[in-house]
Structures are given as structure tokens and as C-alpha cells.
Image (spheres, rainbow, N blue to C red):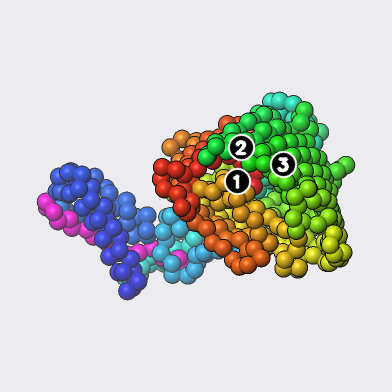
Amino acid sequence: MILHKIKLYFILLSVFCIHFVYGFAVGVPSEFEHFPADSFPNILWRVGFWESRIDSTHRDTVFITLGRPATVDSLAIEVSDTIENIVSSKIIFTKNDTVDASKIERQQEYFVNILENNGYPFASCTTSIAVLSESDEKIGVLLKVLIDEGEKVFLERLEVQTDGKTKSSVIEHFMLFHSWQLYRRNDIEKATARLRKMRIVSVSSEPYPAMDANGRWTLVVKTKDIRTTTVSGLLGYAEDEISGDIEFSTRNFYGTGRIINFNLSAYESDRKIEITYREPFLMKSNISPQIGSKWTIKDSTYTKREHKLGVFIPLGYETDFYLGFLTDRTVPNSMGGSISDGESFGLEFSIRYSTLDDAVLPTNGIYLDGGATGQYLHFWGDENTIDFGSKGNSKILTALKWKLFTLWTEISCWGWIVPIMPEQSQWEYLGGWQNLRGYREDQFTGSRIVWGTIEPRFIPAAGVHIFPFADIGGYRDYEKWHTKFSYGGGIEYRYGAGVFSIEYGIGEGRNIKNGLIHFGLRMNL
């Protein structure tokens, strides 16, 4: 009975607070005569006080007869033996609980949800109430829940209704669909999210089960092609230095889901050419092979050629595993200094997990990426050395949305595990729009690198992000660790297949008048 009194006090306090805010702050007269006459009974009836009524009101006073609470004496669930074990874990009512209408609605929702995620997309649930007993303190009722699970659905095929050239087989593989899979609503939602992240089609409506002309259960997916081929050119200027990129990218070559990326970049006297090709699936499996090559000319120091061949294997709707072979060849130029001829080859693997709502310009979710390599390293010059090498990398990106804002935080690290100090041609770079803004592109180099950023982003319109940022980076050279900071702001704009960004960064030793302008083309994570 004490619990009932506490609940009653809480309800009346809530009503008073609502009345006070609405009446005092907004300016509505405070007399209860101006409050809807049946408001109090409706609130109390929904939480089990069926006999409650308003006796009278006088200006700021209302006189209520509360009556006895209706409580659960008995709970009966009518359900078939097939699904009894499925729904038993979702019962939230217990004996002597007050008959709360919102709790009844929540109970029905729990039953329907768990059935929709266990093969019953047409499940329904109704509840009836009957009085069993009455005393001076309460009304005992029978809460009877009737569950109709409907037909159990195994999806035999996927029917793609496409407005465009994208092949149905591409949609099927990207959604990881297989014949005779049990219908599960959560899985369908995750498969749809995965398809959207591939950025080759838009999904017109949520997929739904239907029976085709041959009596087979079919998952119907309605899609529309989106623009996936872009040619972009970027140009930057700072302190008499001109830098630039040109990139060609397509993620759905002639509707086949094939990905082709070509990038040419020039910073100071450095040049990079990179090309990547990826198949969406191999024969009838969901394995996706990829091949890539990269040529780097590092001023007058060295020329490096890198090649990779690997496969992406989906471990789930949100997780992918990569396994590949990599090799590189380094040739010192005329002023190579300490750089030696070298070559390496080995294996690499990585695991990626993503719940981001968008792969290019996310507003909510988390992205995790971690991997490592095992390599044979051979250098020759003044000395002939052969080593086993291993390096690792990881990345964490979180996006947390609140109304028109999203908060980005990102931490990435890369570095050699053994040997700790390999040839400098095997080091990685830091600086520029991709990691440490406010510094020139690839300004710093080290055998180990770590960097992070925090960006509170304002989203005034879909596909437009305006943000300040604070970056921190560190790199390890032959002497020690060095730490660099920068800050600034920017804007990113979605133009179709990717996002174009303009950012102004201020690094150490610079003031607000002589910061660096960075242009970026974000295509994938």
C-alpha cells in the first residue's frame, strides 16, 4: 500500500509540475476551471485507479476521490507451444503489479518485437482484463494476453526492384542474403544499413516480406541508383608552395558494384600515384578480392613501389575481416643519403567494425579498425641485412548526435613493433588535412605515429557540416618522441559520392593570419 501511495504522490506531483509550467511560464490562467475537466481521471485511470473522479474544484484546489488500485492477481498468456519459450523471457508483469496501461502497451510491444526477430513478421498481440476479486484495499484482476504469431517465414529469394542499372546480384551480396534464411527484423535492418553504407544505391523504403506468384516467401527491396563516379581536382597554396590532387573514383562500375580508385597527388617535390580495384564478390561467395598499387617519389631521396592483393570477408553485417599479401621495393635516388636499396613482402590482416549511420559523413555510431603485418625485410647497400618485421595500426572514430549537432572524436596509431627502427623509407608520414591540420602535407615522418582529434560539428542542412577542431599528433624518430598541436575550423559538403572539405588550420609557430588552408576529398574511412 505504501508503494501505491508513493506512486500516487509522484503522479500528482507530475501533474502539478505540468500545470505550473503551462500555467505560470506560458501565461495560462492558473485556476483549475480552465484545466480540462477529465484530465486527472484520465491520468489516474491509465495507471490503474479506475474509480478515481473529480468531486469538485475551487480556484487552485481540486478535490479527488482516488478509489482502489487495480492490481494483477493472475497473468495468463495464451500462446502456442511453438513460441512459448521465445516469449517467456519477455514477461515484465508480476503478481500485485498495478495495471498500468503504458506497461501493457510495452508488454505487447516486447512480445511482437521478439517474434519479429525469430521468424514471425506478422505477429500480433492483444490484452484483455477481467475482475477476479475485490477488497477494501484493491481490485484484483486477471490480465490475459493473447498472442498470434502468424506464419513462420523463411526467405527463399530476394527480389530487387531497381530504378537504375545496378544488378540484383550486387544488392544480394552486399546485403549478405542467402536462400532459406529465417526472417529476422533486426537482421534485415542491419543488412539494409550495410547496403546504404556501400553508397551505390539509395533504399526507397524498408524491405518487406511478400509471397511471389510461385508461393515462395520473398524479401522485396526497392532501390534507386545514385551517382557513384566522380572526377575531382584539388589545389592548395601556402608560402610559395603549390600542392594538389586529382582523383577518379567509381563505386559501381556499370552497375556491377566494382570499385575503381585512381589518385595522383603532388606536395612540394613529393609525388604519389595510387590505383585500387575491388570486386564486390567472388563467384557466388561474399568474398571480395582487391588489388592495389602505389608509387611514391620522395623528393631526391628514394622511389618506392608498393603492391597489395587481398580479400575482404564479411564476418557479419557490421564486421569485415581483411587478409592480404603485400610487397614493396625501394630504390634510393642520387641524394638518398642513409636510404638503402630494399624490399619486403609478407602478410597483413585487419578487422573492421562499424555502426556508423553513414560511411562518408557520419553523425552517429562507432568505427573500429585494427590490424597488423608480418614481413620479410631485406636491405642492401653499405650493409646487407635481413630482418623479420611486424607493424600494427588501429583507429577509433565515434560520432554522437544531439539534435543539429554531432561530436566527432578520433584516435589513430601506426608503428613498427619489430624492428623498432627500420629503414626510414619504411616510416609513415604525419601532417596535412588527413590527420594533423595546420601543418604541411606529410611534414613529419616517424617509425611510430599517433594522432587524435575532437570536432563538435553543427549540421544546418543535410550533408553540410560546420566545425571547429583541435588536433594532436606525435611521431617517433631516431632521437625521441615529438608532439605537435593544431586547431582551426572547417566545412564539409556532401556532393554525391564523397565529401569535399575546406579547413583552416593553425599549427605551432603560426598565428591566426598565416595558418594553412587544407582541401580534402573524403571518399571512405
Sequence-wise, the earlier of marks 3 and 1 is: 3
* Image vertical order of residue 330 relative to residue 201, above or below: below
- The three-letter amino acid code for the residue at tag 1 is Glu
Q: Is residue 422 left or right of residue 506?
A: right
**Within 10 Å of the Cα at label 1, are there few (<14), some (14-19), or many (20+) other Cα atoms?**
many
Quarter of the image for residue 224 reads top right
Residue 441: assigned label = 1
Q: Are marks 3 and 1 in contact (CB under 8 Å)?
A: no
Residue at 59%, 33% (x, y): give it: 235
Return the x and y of residue 185 as percentages of the image width and height.
65, 48
Q: Give amino acid for label 3.
A: Lys
Residues under numbered marks 2 and 1 in contact, where contact means CB atoms less than 8 Å apart: yes
Quadrant housing the N terminus: bottom left
The residue at 31%/69% (across/down) is 6
Counting residues from the start of the chain, the first of labels 2 and 1 encountered is 2
- Magenta region: 58-73
Q: Does any portion of residue 441 appear in the rendered image?
A: yes
